[in-house]
Amino acid sequence: MEYTGSKYIGEYVDGRMEGKAKYILPTETVYVGEMKDGMFHGEGTLYYPNGSQYDAVWENGLAIKGTYTFADGLHYDEKNWHYCDGYDRRFFTEIRNGLKPAGMAQLTNMDPPRKVPKGWYDCGDGFYNPVTRVIKDYRNRFLRNAGTSLRCIPICPHKQCFLLAS
């Protein structure tokens, strides 16, 4: 598996990845759970480098049902999603910890917020420079080039949080 950039730590049955396992992908995403015939099968969790995770029941490599939890503890709910919408525009940390006094409002979900370089945007996994169309991680390491149709969309109109979209 080293030739794919992945690493498997777990049980084998008849030479196939099967049983309880830890599977590390080249993206540093880690799967911990059950495998069958080389595929995610049964209960397992994907742990992402940004601190978020996806707990799911897998069937032959496909997630049948699951729950996504953001790094800050916010659980995604597909049917009843009301986070940062037109009715309740608080960040999750504000929902969890309460609002700050007048004049000390949060501009991002992080408190204190990251220092965003002038002319750049925080895009969730790093900073985006619209002039160079480069995205660097929070430690100033190159992540990727942005496509020509990429633009920042404010996802909370009254706050400085953006979603990169094509």
Image (cartoon, helix red, strand yellow):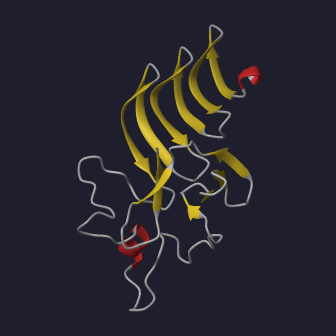
Instruction: Relative to 143, say whether 34 is above or below.
Output: above
Q: Nearer the viewer, residue 107 or 21?
A: 107
Looking at this view, is 73 or 3 the one in front?
A: 3
**x, y percent for residue 75:** 38, 54
In front here: 160 or 54?
160
Q: Position of residue 68 (x, y in %)?
A: 42, 47
Above or below residue 130? Residue 10 is above
Which residue ends up furthest to the bottom in the rendered image?
A: 102
Which residue is drawn at the image coordinates 60% and 71% (left, top)? 114
Asked if residue 130 is positioned above or below residue 48 in the image, the reply reads: below
Q: What residue is at 24 percent from the left and 53 percent from the top?
A: 80
Q: Residue at x 72, y 50 (%)?
A: 142
Quarter-of-image position of residue 43:
top left
Residue found at x 50% / y 47%? 53
Instruction: Answer with the quarter of the image where residue 11 lies.
Output: top right
Image quarter of the N terminus? top right
Which percent across, then down, holds residue 150? 51, 47
Left of 18 or right of it: where is 165? left
